Amino acid sequence: MNPPEQGKDHASAEEQTLIVGLRAGEGAAFERLVRTQSGRMLSVARRFLVSEEDARDAVQDAFLSAFKALPTFDGRARLSTWLHRIVVNTCLMKLRSQRRHPEESIDELLPTFLSDGHQSKPTPRWGETSNEVERAETRQIIREQIAQLAESHRTILLLRDIEELDTETVAQMLDLSVAVVKVRLHRARQALRTLLDPLFGGQPPC
Amino acid sequence: MLTCKQLIESLADYLDGQLPLSRVAAFKLHLLCCDHCRSYLHNYEATIVASQEALRKEEEDTGPIEVPEDLIQAILKARQEP
Ligand SMILES: [Zn+2]
């Protein structure tokens, strides 16, 4: 067992040493930072950006912003948490600067209703999914299905459900209205629910 | 009486505790008598939990990501450029 991390969000003594090295401009400290943190940052960037090249660019841009912002880093958050936020922001900037490509509609993944407002197909109830989700293979499939979501919806699902940012913050970050963020989050979850149906024992899609 | 469509449209607000109090009663009443919507709510919540688990445990599942050495070198080099 690892000893419990003291004050999870506080920088450890080891991290303090690293920060001192970074502030002093020591090359070795920068290299250590990049080697220990870039993997996690790359995996976050890959969730947001489809193209591997964009994901790598985002990680590089994030580090460069971080290096510049280092004098303002107050050490109250962990370096990893701080870098995580920076790379998420960098990915969003990239998404915003890219020309919107037409997306496939996710409508066919949404539930349908009869004219009287009843569900037109019965929803088979999933069993308990928690045991399933304990399997690494299941989690891999879920990640692949999340990656399938149209970008405009996936981005919001990631920011709200995974990064756990609130609706207003996400609306500001993406320059969208609160109402649009809410609708897209709901649709993204619904679409993902449909994509996970075969996995969790609903009926196979036909 | 709330329809399934109206209920499902307000699921996210309900789970966020943002459904106006005046609508919570109708929401719960519909759930009580509608099997489909109960299942839908169950699956919808399970979807959220499953996506969180899957991404939270990504590192555990895939092991540390190999970052291409040329990317690391590019970052370190870019730092030294004015
Ligand atoms: Zn119903």
Image (spheres, coloured by chain):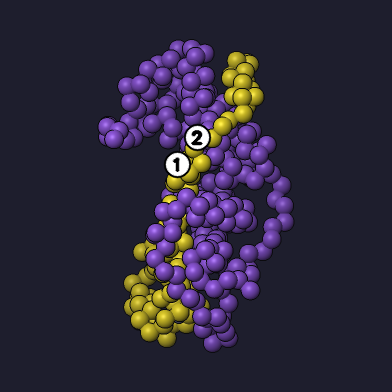
Is residue B42 something that shows in the picture? yes
Residue B37, percent from left and from top: 44, 77
Tag 1: Cα neighbours inside 10 Å, few (<14), some, or many (≥20)? few
Q: State the residue at coordinates (48%, 27%).
A: A36
Q: State the residue at coordinates (44%, 56%).
A: A133
Q: Is mark 1 within 8 Å of ligand 1?
A: no
The yellow-coloured chain is labelled B
Residue B80, percent from left and from top: 60, 15
The colour assigned to chain A within the rendered structure: purple
A190 lies above or below A77:
below
A166 lies above or below A8:
below
Question: Where does the N terminus of chain B fall, quadrant-wise?
Answer: bottom left
Q: What amino acid type is highlighted by mark number 2?
A: Pro
A160 lies above or below B33:
above
Question: Where does the C terminus of chain B fall, quadrant-wise?
Answer: top right
Give the secondary structure at mark 1: helix
Residue A101, percent from left and from top: 72, 52
Tag 2: Cα neighbours inside 10 Å, few (<14), some, or many (≥20)? some
* Left or right position of B15 against A29: left
Q: What amino acid type is highlighted by mark number 1?
A: Glu
**Circles 2 and 1 on the same chain:** yes
Q: State the residue at coordinates (69%, 61%).
A: A104
Q: Give the label on residue B64, or none.
A: 2
Is residue A86 something that shows in the picture? no
Q: Nearer the viewer, residue A137 or A162?
A: A137
Q: Are marks 2 and 1 in contact (CB under 8 Å)?
A: no
Q: Give the label on residue B60, or none.
A: 1
Q: Chain of mark 1?
A: B
Q: Chain of mark 2?
A: B
Q: Quadrant of residue A127?
A: bottom left
Q: Give the label on residue A145, or none.
A: none
